[in-house]
Image: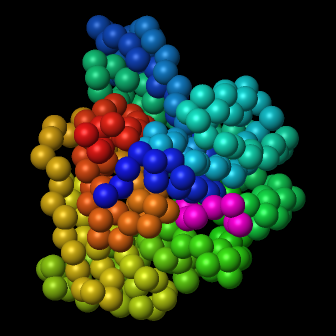
Amino acid sequence: MTTRNNIAAARVLVVGDVMLDRYWFGDVSRISPEAPVPVVRVERVDERPGGAANVARNCAALGAQAQLLSVVGTDEAGVRLETLVAQAGVQARLHHDPDMPTTVKLRVIGRQQQLLRIDFETPPSSEVLAANLAEFSAALPNTDTVILSDYGKGGLTHIETMITLARESEKRVLVDPKGDDYARYQGAFLLTPNRAELQEVVGRWSDEADLTQRAHALRKKLKLHALLLTRSEQGMTLYDDNGEMHVPAQTREVYDVSGAGDTVIASLAVMLATGAELAQAVQVANRAAGIVVGKLGTAVATHAEVFQ
């Protein structure tokens, strides 16, 4: 059984695209006279680590030792993100790129509904990414599992090299994929696509049997140990050499699915770092995901919530 002690000894290295998630909460009582849009009177502002930073925050919330390696800009958002990550108990090594603004996702919430999202983002420079790669290599001896959190913002330009280096160090690599070029993830231990992401790569499936065939074909093509398909209200399905294992979703009210994928891959990595079997890790990840979808925005599932 997994205890707080062996989770506390688990070391997870998270690398990928980080961002600052900002939420403006307000009241909506009228329509603008300038255009047919609601006027939101902002009453409260909330800020949380997003992207790979939220993955690392989830690892720390479960009680593991979380390291984060990424790139931010030399701006107010970057300083704020560093502060939030440190407050979450994450050991962060954030390189600073003066030529890029820190990625920010601004969400405007009125009457508990998201009305608008505004993104500010620019890819990091090649020089900063090269330094990131060198630090990644140096960090490998002091970690148990590696998460590569790909949000398509340019922070994982060297992901093929990272997977190779991790494999040479006998570290299992878990990847949260993005886009339609999964060849760059070849050799990873596990991929965690959602339904839309997998469909973009393998095409539309006609039924469960067709999905199973396509998932296993992709897994073998990319030389993956396993593929975990997250299916929202349908739970998740693990595809590996043992066949398929389906885990139904936890029954609870779904409030917000944003960030649930971060929780899933963080839980998997933490459990694997403790020596748990993959099947057990999937069960824990499913439980943790069921907790965070009941919370607003990028959230975490704590050790007490998951293992109560």
Residue located 61% across and 57% down the image: 13
Q: Nearer the viewer, residue 237 or 5?
A: 5
Q: Is residue 133 visible?
A: no
Q: Residue at x 53, y 26 (%)?
A: 47
Question: x, y percentage for residue 253?
Answer: 16, 37
Identify which residue is drawn at 48% across, 88% down: 223
Seen in the image, is 200 located left or right of residue 160? Answer: left
260 up-or-down from 177: above or below: above
Question: In the image, what residue occupies the spot 27% across and 86% down?
Answer: 242
- Magenta span covers which residues? 140-147
Q: Which residue is nearer to you in this view: 53 or 257?
A: 53
For residue 146: magenta? yes
Give x and y (percent) for residue 104: 60, 36
Left or right for 141, reference 258: right
Q: Position of residue 66 (x, y in %)?
A: 58, 48
Q: Nearer the viewer, residue 187 or 269?
A: 269
Give above or below for 60 relative to 191.
Answer: above
Q: Judge whether residue 96 is colored magenta.
A: no
